[in-house]
Image (tube, rainbow, N blue to C red):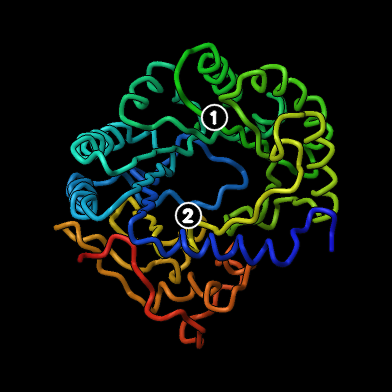
Amino acid sequence: MSQNAAPVADRDDVFEEELVAALADETLHLIVLPTEQCNFRCTYCYEDFEIGRMTPDTVQSVKRLVGRRLDSLQQLNLSWFGGEPLLARTVVEEISSFIVDEVGARPGVRYSADMTTNGYLLDVARAESLARLGVNSYQISLDGPQAFHDTTRLRADGGGSFRRIWQNLISLRRSDLDIRVLLRLHLTPSNISEMREFAPEVRDTFLCDSRFSVHLKAIERMGGPNDEEIEVLAHETRAQAQRELGALLRAGDAARGGARREAACYAARPNSLVIRANGTIAKCTVALNDPRNTVGRIMTDGTLHIDGSQVAPWVRGWGDQDWAAVKCPYAGLPQAGQQLLQLGPPRLAGSAR
């Protein structure tokens, strides 16, 4: 057993806790893509930007879905994704405003909202507006200092993005907003040396503020058009880099690269669904171009038409306590028609009752 591995009994307990959470009918997690367009063209991106902004009809459908489900919920979690969600800010605001009003009329329902954004459009004024609508947690990626970041996280017009993102982050830190910002530092074979210099700067600039935290994430090949050209870290090199950089950051287990509690991927949870900008229902925000990821569609009245045979492969790990399939169901996802061990018919988040 490795030094960081949990005892078998502990892993079994954690798995049971994750299973209970994943099957909880009173909890609903929606990942909403208000647009699949982006103002960046990151060199390792897997998205194709073929789908645009969510239409008014689909916006109404999302609101009706939430309205149908709230009376049976104790917890609603909403994650904004894209594309770049702030390119469709009015969609975010319309849906968020509706939810805040509806949840306000139901004291027994807890609501949380977060956003994955490139940070380019997230100034303090926008963050203040979003905070009033319940969006108070952000994940923002940095690829290193400006000289490196601006070669990989390019704007759609080819320009660099670092300076504005960094200034927005500093402005957020100087604000008194009750928010949380997870800085996701991307690691590649080419930027490790730069990250050794950058990590202390991130630490000294942001980690003195408890609202900020860091996650060290190695870039992977995710099916994008540039996959063959993307250099990725070998497993051992990745682990070593995370330990070394985590020590430089000295800010919590995730930042230090220490042991982290095992957890199920959202895509493995029956009570978590992705609503794409065109109304398609998916399970995973990475496999957007994989037909196995299309599991249904949201209807005009807010009901969901779900294909259980498409959902089953994503939730397969629960049946035989397969941690690998639960932590990343897309890895090893069975092909259509393959026999699966199931717990029974998939329990579908958001389905009409």
Q: In the rendered view, tell whether residue 241 sits above or below residue 204.
A: below
Q: Kindly identify which numbered label has been placed on residue 181.
A: 1
In the image, residue 188 lies at what x, y percent?
Answer: 75, 43
Q: At label 1, which amino acid type do we have?
A: Val
Numbered disc 2: secondary structure: loop
Please rate how many residues cluster around mark 2, counting C-alpha atoms within 10 Å: few if below 14, some from 14 to 19, many from 20.
many
In the image, residue 350 lies at what x, y percent?
Answer: 29, 60
Left of 218 or right of it: where is 241?
Answer: right
Q: In the rendered view, tell whether residue 90 sits above or below residue 44.
A: above
**Quarter in which the C terminus is drawn:** bottom left
Left of 101 or right of it: where is 25?
Answer: right
Residue appearing at x 59%, y 26% in the figure: 212
Residue appearing at x 80%, y 44% in the figure: 189
- Nearest the viewer among 270 and 169 is 270
- Nearest the viewer among 13 and 285 is 13
Marked residue nearer the N-terminal end (2 or 1): 1
Q: Quadrant of residue 167?
A: top right
Q: At label 2, which amino acid type do we have?
A: Thr
Please rate how many residues cluster around mark 1, counting C-alpha atoms within 10 Å: few if below 14, some from 14 to 19, many from 20.
many
Q: Kindly identify which numbered label has been placed on residue 285.
A: 2
In the image, residue 310 lies at what x, y percent?
Answer: 40, 75
Residue appearing at x 48%, y 35% in the figure: 117
In the image, residue 52 lies at what x, y percent?
Answer: 33, 46
